Image: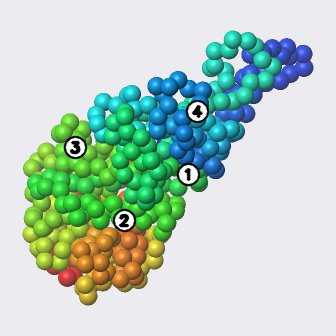
Amino acid sequence: MFPPPPTNPLERLQVTDGLLMNADRWRRAHEYHRQRQNIHYQSLNQPGIVCGLGVRLIAAPAEVAPQFRDGRWVQIQPGIAIDLAGNPIVVSEPIEFRVSGETLTENPQMVYLAISYVDPEKLRRKESREFEKETFRLDEKTTPPSEMEVELCRIFLQSESEELENPKDVFFPTVNSLDLRYRAIARSRPQAVVRVAQVTQQQPADGRSFSNLSYLLNSVPALYPSLQGADQIGQVPFLGAEKSLPLAALGYDLLYFTGRQALYLNDREFEALKNYLETGGVLLVDAATDAIELIESIMAIAQQLGTPLEDIKRLSRNHPLRTQPFLFAALPSLNQQPIQLGYGGGIILVVGNLSAAWGLDDKLLLPRETIRTAQELGINLLHFAWRKRQLTQLLRADNPVSTVAKPSVKQAIFDKLQF
C-alpha cells in the first residue's frame, strides 16, 4: 500500500521589512506551499488516474523510419493523474508511443506502460524561460511501476515480432493484448491498511483457504471503505521469513492459520509467537467443528501463554470483535451450525470453518446473505487485528515491555468455549 507522507519539518520564509528577495528565497517560499499541498493530498488520498489517459492501438506514424512501422504503436489519450506525493500529471495532447519489447529478458513477459511526474527544476534546459511547463515521463518497463509512477497499461508480450491487439474480452485479456484492469484510480485514502499473512508451518499451504482469504480482503473496500487489505497476502512460518526475521519484525497485523492437525511449537517457535503477540499482533485460527486436535492445541498454547481463551459470549457485549465495524448480536451460522469464537491474549479461535463462506464454494450454492454475513464478521476480525496492533505500537514506542503473564495450568477444551 502507499505510505503516508514523510515526517520532515516544513521551513517557512520569515518576511520582514527590508528583506532582499532573490531567486533562491522566491523558490523556497513557493516550495513551502507546494510541500503543504502535497502533504495534504498524500495524507487524505491515494495516487492514481483522475480522468482520461486511455490507451488505444494506432497505425505507425508515417514519419517514423521503415523498420519501426509495425503493429506495436499505441496512443495515450489526454488526461490527468496524481502521483504519490500529490504532484499532478497533466497530458494535454495525445502521445504516440511504440512498445518495443527490447527490454524483455523472458518470452513471454509482462510489460508495463507507466507515467511519472517530472519536476521542471530538474530539467536540463538549453535556454532560460520565464515560464516552464510541468511535464512527465512515459516509460516501458518489465518491472511493476514504482510508488512514484502511475500505471496506464500492461501487456503480456509474446515476442518482439508479434503485433499488439485489443482484447476480445476486456476482463480477460490474452497474450499481446492491452490490459487496462490494474489502472489505479485516484481516491480517498482508507483509514487503515491491514497486513495479513498465512502461516504455513508443519503442513503445506491450503490453496482453498488462501483463495478464500483473498476473497475476504477483496471485499473490504466495498463493505467498509475505511479499511483496506494490503496488496499481497504473505506466507510465513512462525519463525519468520527464512528463519531470519522474527514475526514481530515482519509487520503483519494478522497471522491466519487453518487446517485439521494439531499445532505444535518448539521453544523457539513459541517465543516467536509470544513476541509477536506482545507487539500487538493477532493470530487467527480458523478450524472446522470436528478439527478437535487443532482446537485443543490452540487452547493449550493460549494456556501456556497465560491468556486462556474466553467464549465471545462471556466477553463484554461491546467488545470490538462483536461491534466494530459491524454489529453482531448472535454469530452467524454456516451449514446450519453456529460459528463459535473465542479470544484471549491476541489469539482468536473461530470454530465452524468461517473462511469457507468468504468466497465461492465448489458447487456455487452458498446464498449471497451467507457470504455477506461471513465477510462482515471477517472484516470485524481484520479491523480488530489492525486496531489492536496500532494501539499497542503507539504505547510501545522504541522501548517494548513484556506484558504476557506466566503460563498457567491447562484447562479442558470445553471449559471456556461451548461447542
At 22% from the left and 41% from the top, the residue drawn is 241
Marks 1/4: CA–CA distance: 30 Å
Callout 2 crowding tier (Cα within 10 Å): few <14, some 14–19, many ≥20: many
Q: Residue visible at 32% across and 70% down?
A: 359
Which of the two discs, 3 and 2, labels the residue nearer the N terminus?
2
In depth, the one of 184 and 154 nearer the eye is 154
Q: Nearer the viewer, mark 3 or mark 2?
A: 2
- Marks 2 and 4, Cα distance to the nearest angstrom? 47 Å
Instruction: Identify residue for label 1.
Output: 185
**Disc number lying in front (3 or 1):** 1
Residue 106, located in which quarter of the rendered image? top left
Q: Residues within 10 Å of mark 4 (few under 14, many from 20)?
A: some
Residue 216, numbered label: 2
- The alpha-carbon separation of the residues under discs 1 and 2 comes to 21 Å
Q: CA distance from mark 3 to mark 1?
A: 34 Å
Query: Secondary structure beneath disc 3?
Result: loop
Q: Nearer the viewer, residue 208 or 310?
A: 208
Under mark 3, the amino acid is: Gly
Whether residue 183 is visible here, answered yes or no, is yes
Q: Are marks 3 and 1 in contact (CB under 8 Å)?
A: no
The quarter of the picture where the C terminus appears is bottom left
Percent of width and height locating residue 61: 58, 33
Q: Which residue in the structure is indicated by mark 4?
A: 61
Q: Is residue 275 visible?
A: no
**Which label belongs to residue 240?**
3
- The amino acid at mark 2 is Leu
